[in-house]
Image (cartoon, rainbow, N blue to C red):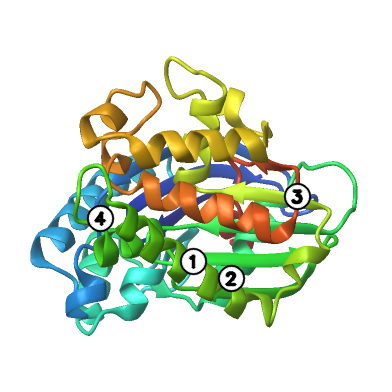
Amino acid sequence: MTRVAAVDCGTNSIRLLVADVDPSTGGLVELDRRMTIVRLGQGVDRTGRLAPEALERTFAACREYAGIIKEYGVEAPSAGGGGGRIRFVATSASRDAENRDEFVNGVAGILGVEPEVISGDQEAEFSFTGATRGLPGHEERLVVDIGGGSTEFVIGRGRVEAARSVDIGCVRLTERHVRSDPPAPEEIAAVRADIEAALDLAGRTVPIREASTLVGLAGSVTTVAGIALGLDAYDSEAIHHARISRDRVAEITERLVRSTHDERAAIPVMHPGRVDVIVAGALVLLAIMDRAGVPEVVVSEHDILDGIALSLV
């Protein structure tokens, strides 16, 4: 077994997975998995730059993760930055930012490894590999990773056949359109219009309607699943591979659209960092289900982190 550390830094959150991976079988034993809301993408859609306070929140999380990685004895990179079993992948917000070098240099100084600012297509492939690990059968699956700045679509039957990343993330849509509490009807209409346009774009590359199974990833999906399951607290084991019907997702989305910030914050499974962006995230999920014509979504707690970890061996 090879011990590895994978870090995924997105628009809304930064996450760590430390795992033992069997190079011969691809088996993965999770040792530590955690998530911190840092909102790295704060204001990027408007300014084109990473805000100083967002960078500092992210660097603080990196310092915490560096200590955890060291405690588990993961092989560190050499002084020149080569080798090691740590991989840091950065996604939508850092792809879009003019001052991405500040981010890259800061992370490298803390963790000893430069973040790889990957393309949306690479992000989609990692998500597909991680999400489909452990799922039975070989049907055509559409994996959707609803992030803060973008959503990745990838379809395949055991391997990636087509992938596309589009700029409809829960943070991006919220910052672009939502000003009222609860959101005004015209704001919701604007969010929905952006989503439909992005689905048209994604559909040019990914045959969304051809999938027999929809697999949903990331915080917006897992939060909706937690609400649907009536959980009193977030329970990863209960959420993983849960099947949530389209009608239940529609019911929850309507509830979230009509709720105030405080009402959303009072939902037991709601992470404080998702309260203000969950409406947009739920709207994205529902629109994808309707476009795909599927009766349910299979929720996965295995995602891009697992794909990154597997890539290290």
Q: Report the number of discs.
A: 4
**Residue density around tag 3, few if under 14, some if 14–19, many if 20 or more, within 10 Å:** some
* Residue 285 pos. (x, y %): 55, 51
Q: Counting residues from the N terminus, which is met first, the one under dot 3 or under dot 4?
A: 4
* Residue 28 pos. (x, y %): 66, 43
Q: Secondary structure at mark 4?
A: loop
Q: Which residue is identified by label 1?
A: 195
Whether residue 224 is visible: yes
Instruction: Judge by depth and name the residue closer to the eye, 214 or 187.
Output: 187
Q: Secondary structure at mark 3?
A: loop
Is disc 1 in contact with disc 3, using a CB cutoff of under 8 Å? no
Circle 3: residue type: Val
Q: Which residue is identified by label 4?
A: 39
Q: Counting residues from the N terminus, which is met first, the one under dot 3 or under dot 2?
A: 2
* Residue 257 pos. (x, y %): 38, 42
| Marking on residue 199 | 2
Q: Residue at x 50, y 58 (%)?
A: 85
Instruction: Judge by depth and name the residue closer to the eye, 134 or 157.
Output: 157
Quadrant where the image shows the N terminus: top right
Q: Secondary structure at mark 1?
A: helix
Circle 1: residue type: Ile
Q: Which residue is identified by label 3?
A: 294
Is disc 1 in contact with disc 2, using a CB cutoff of under 8 Å? yes
Is disc 3 in contact with disc 4, using a CB cutoff of under 8 Å? no
Q: Secondary structure at mark 2?
A: helix
Q: CA distance from mark 1 to mark 3?
A: 17 Å
